[in-house]
Image (spheres, helix red, strand yellow):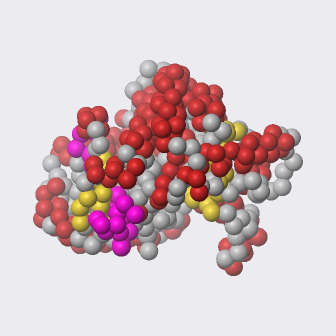
Amino acid sequence: MSVVSQEKAILPETDHLDRTVDELVAAKKVWARTGIDERLAILEAIRTGIMRVAEDWALTAARAKQIPDGSPLVGEEWMSGPYALMSGCDALALTLREMDGKRFLKHVPVRDLPTGQVAARVFPQSIFDRLLLSGVTADVWMKPGVTRANLADNTAHAYDIPAAQREGKVALVLGAGNIAAIAPLDCFQKIFVEHQVTLLKLNPVNDYLYDFFVVALKPLIDANALRIVRGGADVGAYLCDHPGIDEIHITGSQASHDAIVWGPGEQGRAAKSRGTPRNARRITSELGAVCPTIVVPGPWSRADIAFQAEHIASQKLHNSGFNCIACQMLVVSDGWDKTDALLAKIDETIAAAPSRGLYYPGATQRMADFAKRGRPTMVARKGTSDCVVIPFAKANDPSIATQEVFAPALSVHRLDASDPETFLRAAIAYANDELYGTLGANILIHPATIRAIGRQTFETIVAELRYGCIAINAWTGLGFLLAQPRGARSRAIRSTTCAAGSVSCTTASCSTRPSGRS
């Protein structure tokens, strides 16, 4: 989450910020024309830098998030921090080594979808991928009009421009405050995929990462491709309006995005309704949402129910619930004879989950506000705050479906349909039409149910989901962990993740026309 106020502020460090931007402006053409061999050397040096700081990075982040020493939850910080960034380095290097003639596409299986689109299988790519995430696959679903024949023309487009003709740009990345690797991976997108030098403004919530980033990313800093600054909303607002900034990327809330684009308060709302942005720069964003998990009725065993209860609880409680991609609306069938058993098992699993603090600012108040919107069930958790679960009924405040909580809180929505295909179509229509946002959606479905529906029919139905990242029998968090597909960066991106897992969009594989919401 990133919060930017547009109120005028007097900043004592504006001279420093101006000099920092000026340094990037002076370097933008040089970086844009930097050759692939030098970029590969920088990525290799970054790998070395990550190794130097990885342990201190992960342990410091765990302490900042109030994770007890020795807890298995510390593993979250390894996976979503040093590992994710290292994975990004490796995947980019793999692509760049074979950029000439876009030879990297020779290793990417392509298949035709029932919709007429093509899908590129970007994960797994190595034996390590197969060992770490056995059975998981990730596909990039390309936009209509992209074919096998013209796939190369729609991939790594920035590298089609001869180096001598590149002019470069300066990008501002407003870093996420929750997941450590998001900010540097966003910088990788700008620097390596789009040839833009980048100013990273860290979020105050996790600006303790500064000391680790300046070591791990020193090769980019030395190449004048990256600068990192700290500060509050006033610094972010100043930089968003700086004349030296060409483009902006934000990970955060719709409110933060709108404040940047349209302006604050009533003035901003009026500008938005008129369609007259105060900030005309190209702005990309990964915004929060009320993300659904759709549970399709099927022949689930007691073991399936226990496993999927843990799966759903993890989708909610990972990072203490502070994920834009966390499940906030569980969509179930009211006529399925296993729904009540699943919901009871989810409550039991949440109650038994390891304790951890609500480290993100404002969480306690957001949860209290959320609890007032319906008739909540408070799932008690030992040593930490209760998890708020609200069965979603017509009498509830409709904002349950339209406001992201960004905390350990969950809603449950029951649909009448019990036939699997009918339910799935109804659940997708509900998610598309009633839930706020387009970031990610999860579908949990028994393989036998997919076979009964038919693989082609199933994929045709899934294609109706207007979400950037779609996970099937997986969590869309995988779409962000994996460098190759990297989930939904904006409303324009399409993603899929399948039963043994599957995802789409990309940073490292450089696809430039993944399919989008119409």
Could you tell me which residue is drawn at 29 percent across and 34 percent down?
Answer: 128
Residue 293, by quadrant, is bottom left
503 to 40, vertically: above or below: below
Left or right relative to 4: residue 470? left
Could you tell me which residue is drawn at 72 percent across and 49 percent down?
Answer: 25
Instruction: Please indicate, yes or no, whether residue 475 appears anywhere in the rendered image.
Output: no
Prevailing secondary structure of the magenta residues: loop
Indicate the position of residue 460 as horizontal and vertical percent values: 26, 70
300 to 128, vertically: above or below: below
Indicate the position of residue 218 as horizontal and vertical percent values: 60, 30
Query: Which is nearer the eye, 119 or 357?
Result: 119
Could you tell me which residue is drawn at 13 percent across and 57 percent down?
Answer: 448
Q: Which region of the structure is painted magenta?
A: 132-153
Could you tell me which residue is drawn at 71 percent across and 65 percent down?
Answer: 279
Residue 292, by quadrant, is bottom left
Left or right relative to 512: residue 447? left
Indicate the position of residue 379 as horizontal and vertical percent values: 42, 44
Query: Which is nearer the eye, 315 or 368?
Result: 315
Left or right relative to 110: residue 224? right
Instruction: Please indicate, yes or no, whether residue 129 appears anywhere in the rendered image.
Output: yes
Task: Indicate yes or no whether the magenta region holds residue 499.
Answer: no
